[in-house]
Image (cartoon, rainbow, N blue to C red):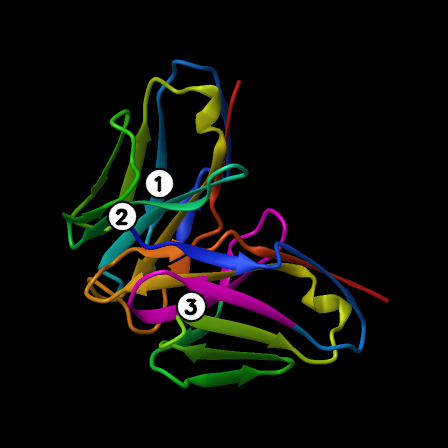
Amino acid sequence: DSGVTQTPKHLITATGQRVTLRCSPRSGDLSVYWYQQSLDQGLQFLIQYYNGEERAKGNILERFSAQQFPDLHSELNLSSLELGDSALYFCASSPRTSSSYGYTFGSGTRLTVV
Amino acid sequence: ELKVEQNPLFLSMQEGKNYTIYCNYSTTSDRLYWYRQDPGKSLESLFVLLSNGAVKQEGRLMASLDTKARLSTLHITAAVHDLSATYFCAVRRAAGNKLTFGGGTRVLVKP
């Protein structure tokens, strides 16, 4: 157990639907990062939050949004889902806004859009 | 835009032999990371390399960094079956937050 908790582990939903993925960072970590892993795009950075504020944005679609709550857990909202959104979504956390010692990854949420 | 390339993409290893995975990146960075991922699992941190000439070793794995050549290598000594996994390198740009990952090297160690 890495200390980063992601729920749910698996999610199957239909095109056009909306889902929410949840991430609880490791105790004491203030930064949360979301990554998408797909066969064709590899591992891609989506977005980072630090202590409730957005800090960096990557290749995140407009249909996707995220937030970090006062208790530091984060949610990634995916809407108007398409087949191509099927992927493994990872959350990672680090102690500060950027980490010299690595990022701790959760076990991921596997999203299947049918 | 920072690009990270790994090669080879797939490596079939024989137990007991030595192999090297290469990671090239296109622009200046201040951190290079190596991760291991088992099928359907999370990414496990292996090494963080902070400066030119850095070398780190853990068991049969050794990672090194040459910032002038923008190259990192992951050397596997006397491969064993337990090392079968996909290995990723990732680079963080100086003063940046996000990690840019290479495409991964899938390693299969055969007896």
What span is colored magenta in the figure? B20-44
Report the chain holding disc 2.
Answer: A
Residue type, numbered disc 2: His
Q: Element under label 1?
A: strand
Q: Which residue is mark 2?
A: A73
Is residue B21 rendered magenta in the image? yes
Neighbour class for label 3 at 10 Å: few (<14), some, many (≥20)?
many
- Residue B61: percent from the left, percent from the top? 60, 78
Q: Quadrant of residue B11?
A: bottom right
> In this figure, which residue is indicated by the disc labeled 1?
A22
The amino acid beneath tag 1 is Arg
Q: Secondary structure at mark 3?
A: strand
| Label 1 to label 2: alpha-carbon separation | 7 Å
Depth order, front residue of A45/B6:
B6
Residue position marked by numbered label 3 in the rendering: B33
Q: Residue at (41%, 86%) from the top-left corner?
A: B53
The chain that hosts pointer 3 is B
Residue at point 62%, 83% (across, down): B59
Q: Position of residue A77 (x, y in %)?
A: 30, 31
Asked whether the beta carbons under mark 1 and mark 2 sit within 8 Å of each other, the answer is: yes
Mark 3–mark 1 CB contact (< 8 Å)? no
Horizontal and vertical percent for residue B82? Answer: 72, 67
